[in-house]
Image (cartoon, rainbow, N blue to C red):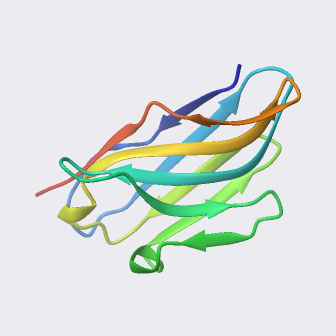
Amino acid sequence: QVQLVESGGGLVQPGGSLRLSCKASGTNYLVYEMSWHRQAPGKQRELIASISRSGSTNYTESLKGRFAISRDLAADTVYLQMNSLKPEDTAVYYCHADLIAGGRPGGAWGQGTQVTVSS
């Protein structure tokens, strides 16, 4: 079984920055694409960005420029650098991994980390 654990959320003022981390752990697995998503109250979960093992990235166009995804393959960790944060960025942020575990393809979600942007 593979677990994803996010960290780095919290309360930040508008215009501030946060860096989220998400680490995968488990046995007998290989992580392929990793991604960040968010879900604001009353809204659907939305994709922010994804990154492949080779480092290729894709972003939701409206967030490109303020958010940056990166990855440490050796540490099985994905990061999300968030700059110029706005109140509308307030949401629970989740990471997701496409992976093979025990020889079977699948996916895993983290438990989520709250990001609140408020003065």
54 sits to left or right of 44: right
Above or below: residue 19 compared with residue 75: below
29 sits to left or right of 6: right
Above or below: residue 62 compared with residue 95: below
Q: Residue at x 28, y 61 (%)?
A: 89
Quadrant that contains the C terminus: bottom left
Q: Residue at x 48, y 48 (%)?
A: 20
Find residue 117 and report its image quarter.
bottom left
Find residue 111 and report its image quarter.
top left
Q: Position of residue 47 (x, y in %)?
A: 47, 60
Q: Is residue 35 visible?
A: yes
Q: Residue at x 46, y 43 (%)?
A: 94
Above or below: residue 76 compared with residue 29: below
Q: Residue at x 71, y 36 (%)?
A: 106
Q: Is residue 76 visible?
A: no
Depth check: give the residue in front, 99 or 83.
99
Q: Position of residue 82 (x, y in %)?
A: 42, 63
Q: How many marks?
A: 0
Above or below: residue 37 compared with residue 111: below
Q: Position of residue 91 (x, y in %)?
A: 28, 50
Find residue 99 and report its image quarter.
top right
